[in-house]
Image: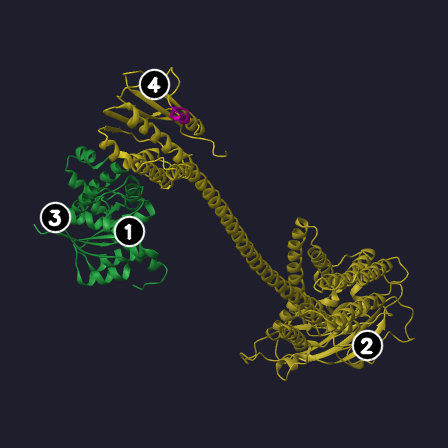
Chain colours: A green, B yellow
């Protein structure tokens, strides 16, 4: 099995060193490069196409989001993971809309980091109750459309998000839905993708309404 | 509109003149008699008083006795029309009545249709004769189909005495029977009248009936039908105006219009009604007729003046007073009763009104007012014409024009009223537009004010929130950091302890952040957040968490400040469990109890004795926090039997606090 290539973009030296060390220690991962700011990161990404991109949301002047967007547009095969200090809703939602498919808390332990990267690469994503709630609000607002195919979320995705918003963890949700934990995480990742698409559609719709974009 | 008015006036005048003009050469010309022979004679004095219409034995003989035979002396040439015939000279013997005979001779023409000699129906048509009763005598010839065999003499062919009162406005039409073409007809038209009066006679027409019928019909139409129809129409409109006025008393013009229509109808009566027979009633009738003309003038003036912007109260009152006095003075039985004076009064009123309005119209009169004034002047001209007709200054064959004058006035009024109406509609539209504009401005103002207010409120809210946050951080983080700093500087803390303190700070900061997350009044989401944060730690400590939360209705008071308190409270409980209970299982459940919710945290740890003094400050704090949230906390524990902490919170709280 080929090792997962990981690129880390983090402006704080200590954290950068810590992350690099974590990745280096993992047997199935390979550190493909590090960068300290946006220009360096862009330059790095010209030549390297990593499997996982780890981006610090706290990059100076909001450039973390820019990098996520760049990666989303130009590196479709790369999974973008965002590192955030507190994991609060505005930051996470912004990253998800920009194209990230996973997020981490900055003070996570080493095993967690590596575990999350593996899970992300395998197709699943982590989530918090508030994020789940926001997703539900954005993609499945009340009242529900009558036709099942009009809804943006599939029934399973909706169930996962609802249970997550209530505080159940992935194991509990997997037990309740009779699926594996990994499957639950893939539903989450799919919901994130739908959010990206949805927010893009919304943006285009708004732009059209404002006359910024012609048909 | 002025052009239309003038055109109509001109058309009417022309029509009337055409009626009165001499016909062009042709059969009509042949029928026209403008040369006659006149004989006048006084009737005997001892006559029945109520001649000429009195019927008595020998009346015909009496009337005809003054008529000499055609070839006798006593006939003078006279030309027709005869205007203003002077009274008889001093040859008159104090008689009460005199007769004026006009003699004409006509040869019966042949009908143009067939000249084979069939008889021609002949008629005598006299457009107007006024001043006395009319008689028609025929000398010789056939009379009623009988051929007179004896010596020709005068016979009374037609007697118009019965209608002598209305005679002045009725044409004379006498059927002379079907005569053989070529017959010579000798006719004499007699006018019986008082000697001091004067009479007027138009030209005579003797000719075939078909020829003259049309002229008669036209004349009847113009002289009688027209005034009648016009009066009734006007009266009907006046009735409508009266009803309007009754509905809205303030609208004076309607009342004036109604009164004008009544006065005008009264005025026009004399053109077509049957007159009363007694002398007294006749006098009163003529008084009413003449007075009503002045009243029409004054009322029209008062009505017209309402179309002018200026107010002329004094003038109105003076005019009204004048007409009232004149009307009273002209009543039968009053000393100033000569007919000419009544007409004089009317003329003065007409002139006065006309001049006033003309002056007003000239100086700053509106277009409508000028139009009405013009119509009034046309009316005055017509009135003058009628005056000349009555007094015999113009040919009696003309037609009285005043009834038609009203038509023009009425058109002028209609136009002015319509103009007023459209102006009023325009004003209404304008006012509406202005109102809308004002409304729009006001709305915009209100909106800006509202926005400003909202902005201020937002600022206020943000400020309060910032203050709250600072307070909270100061209380939680601030004090912990400060005390830790002091301890580290004093060298009384080891690295692991420092790490623990720092982690506590991070945790508290996390709590504050979590309390700010959008949970939308949902307590379950709040608790879920806490579990998300602490789940790992509980696992690491070997605790198995049973998450048995159920949906709860939204808490209307659950905003960040109180959310933070709840998080801190629950975290304290969990921290207690972690530190002191030594438990293996922990259960978190929620429940709705009527108007309250319950959060249950149960562990199977070692428990403690609730009777004893509460351990540490944790439990006291918990009770305080719960009270501040509007709820309470119940702790149920016994040594060796685990602990159950129940936090009760209200569903709804009064938010005004």
Q: CA distance from mark 1 to mark 4?
A: 45 Å
- Magenta region, mostly helix, strand or loop? helix
Is B508 left or right of B252, judged from the image as shown?
left
Q: Chain of mark 1?
A: A
Give the spatial CA distance, label 3 vs label 4: 51 Å
Would you say residue B618 sits in the magenta stretch? yes
Residue highlighted by disc 3? A28
Q: Residues within 10 Å of mark 4 (few under 14, many from 20)?
A: some
Q: Which residue of the protein is positioned furthest toward the left in this rendering?
A: A1
Are tags 3 and 2 found on a single chain? no
Which is in the foreground here, disc 4 or disc 2?
4
Q: Chain of mark 2?
A: B
Which of the two residues, B532 or B280, is positioned nearer the viewer here?
B532
Of tags 1 and 4, the one toward the viewer is 4
**Residue B548 seen anywhere in this rendered image of the structure:** yes
Q: Residues within 10 Å of mark 1 (few under 14, many from 20)?
A: many
Image coords of residue B279 (percent x, y): 82, 58
The residue that label 1 is drawn on is A95
Residue B86 location, quadrant: bottom right
In which quarter of the view is residue A174 placed?
top left
Q: Residue at x 31, y 56 (%)?
A: A203
Q: The magenta stretch spans which residues?
A: B616-622
């Amino acid at each position: 099995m080929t090792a997962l290539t990981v690129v880390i973009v983090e402006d704080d030296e200590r954290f950068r060193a810590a992350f690099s060390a974590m990745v280096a220690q993992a047997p199935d991962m390979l550190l493909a490069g590090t960068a300290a700011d946006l220009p360096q990161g862009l330059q790095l990404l010209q030549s390297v196409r990593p499997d996982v991109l780890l981006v610090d949301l706290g990059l100076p002047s909001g450039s973390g989001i820019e990098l996520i967007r760049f990666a989303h547009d130009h590196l479709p095969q790369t999974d973008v993971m965002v590192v955030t200090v507190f994991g609060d809703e505005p930051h996470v939602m912004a990253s998800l809309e920009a194209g990230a498919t996973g997020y981490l808390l900055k003070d996570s332990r080493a095993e967690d980091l590596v575990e999350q990267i593996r899970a992300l690469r395998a197709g699943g994503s982590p989530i918090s109750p508030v994020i789940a709630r926001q997703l539900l609000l954005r993609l499945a607002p009340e009242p529900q459309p009558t036709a099942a195919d009009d809804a943006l979320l599939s029934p399973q995705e909706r169930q996962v998000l609802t249970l997550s918003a209530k505080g159940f963890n992935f194991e509990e949700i997997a037990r309740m839905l009779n699926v594996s934990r990994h499957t639950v995480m893939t539903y989450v990742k799919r919901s994130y993708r739908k959010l990206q698409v949805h927010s893009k559609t919304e943006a285009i719709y708004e732009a059209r309404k404002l006359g910024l974009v012609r048909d | 509109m002025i052009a239309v008015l003038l055109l109509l006036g001109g058309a009417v005048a022309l029509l009337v003149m055409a009626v009165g003009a001499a016909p062009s050469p042709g059969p009509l010309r042949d029928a026209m008699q403008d040369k006659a022979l006149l004989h006048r004679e006084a009737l005997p004095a001892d006559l029945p008083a109520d001649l000429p219409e009195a019927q008595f034995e020998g009346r015909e003989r009496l009337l005809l006795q003054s008529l000499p035979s055609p070839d006798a002396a006593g006939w003078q040439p006279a030309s027709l029309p005869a205007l203003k015939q002077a009274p008889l000279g001093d040859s008159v013997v104090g008689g009460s009545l005199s007769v004026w005979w006009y003699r004409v001779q006509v040869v019966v023409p042949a009908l143009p249709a067939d000249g084979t000699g069939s008889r021609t129906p002949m008629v005598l048509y006299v457009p107007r004769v006024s001043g006395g009763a009319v008689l028609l005598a025929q000398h010789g010839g056939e009379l009623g189909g009988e051929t007179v065999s004896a010596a020709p003499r005068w016979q009374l062919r037609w007697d118009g005495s019965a209608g002598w009162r209305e005679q002045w406005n009725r044409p004379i039409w006498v059927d002379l029977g079907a005569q053989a073409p070529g017959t010579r007809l000798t006719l004499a038209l007699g006018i019986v009248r008082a000697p001091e009066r004067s009479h007027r006679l138009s030209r005579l027409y003797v000719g075939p009936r078909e020829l003259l019928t049309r002229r008669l019909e036209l004349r009847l139409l113009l002289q009688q039908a027209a005034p009648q129809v016009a009066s009734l129409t006007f009266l009907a409109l006046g009735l409508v105006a009266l009803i309007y006025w009754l509905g809205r008393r303030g609208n004076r013009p309607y009342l004036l219009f109604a009164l004008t229509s009544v006065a005008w109808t009264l005025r026009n009566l004399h053109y077509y009604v049957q007159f009363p027979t007694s002398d007294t009633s006749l006098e009163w009738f003529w008084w009413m007729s003449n007075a009503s003309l002045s009243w029409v003038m004054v009322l029209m003036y008062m009505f017209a003046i309402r179309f002018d912007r200026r107010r002329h109260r004094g003038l109105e009152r003076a005019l009204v007073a004048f007409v009232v006095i004149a009307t009273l003075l002209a009543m039968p039985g009053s000393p100033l009763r000569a007919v000419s004076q009544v007409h004089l009064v009317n003329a003065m009123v007409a002139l006065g009104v006309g001049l006033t309005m003309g002056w007003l119209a000239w100086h700053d009169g509106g277009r409508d007012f000028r139009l009405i004034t013009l119509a009034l002047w046309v009316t005055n001209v017509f009135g003058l014409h009628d005056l000349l007709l009555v007094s015999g200054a113009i040919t009696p064959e003309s037609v009285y024009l005043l009834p038609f004058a009203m038509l023009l006035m009425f058109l002028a009024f209609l136009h002015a009223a319509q103009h007023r109406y459209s102006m009023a509609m325009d004003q209404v539209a304008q006012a509406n537009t202005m109102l809308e504009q004002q409304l729009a401005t006001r709305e915009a103002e209100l909106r800006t004010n509202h926005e400003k207010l909202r902005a201020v409120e937002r600022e206020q809210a943000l400020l309060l929130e910032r203050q709250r946050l600072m307070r909270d951080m100061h209380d939680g983080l601030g004090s912990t950091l400060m005390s830790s700093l002091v301890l580290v500087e004093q060298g009384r803390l080891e690295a692991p302890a420092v790490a623990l303190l720092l982690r506590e700070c991070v945790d508290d900061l996390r709590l504050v952040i979590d309390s700010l997350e959008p949970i939308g009044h949902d307590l379950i989401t709040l608790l879920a957040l806490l579990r998300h944060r602490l789940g790992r730690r509980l696992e690491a400590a070997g605790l198995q968490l049973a998450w048995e939360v159920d949906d709860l209705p939204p808490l209307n008071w659950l905003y960040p400040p109180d959310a933070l308190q709840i998080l801190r409270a629950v975290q304290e409980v969990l921290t207690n469990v972690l530190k002191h209970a030594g438990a293996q299982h922990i259960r978190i459940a929620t429940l709705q109890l009527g108007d309250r919710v319950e959060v249950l945290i149960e562990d199977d740890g070692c428990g403690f004795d609730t009777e004893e003094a509460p351990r540490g400050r944790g439990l006291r704090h918990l009770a305080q926090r719960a009270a501040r949230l509007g709820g309470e906390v119940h702790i149920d524990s016994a040594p060796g039997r685990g602990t159950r902490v129940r936090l009760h919170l209200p569903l709804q709280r009064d938010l005004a606090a």
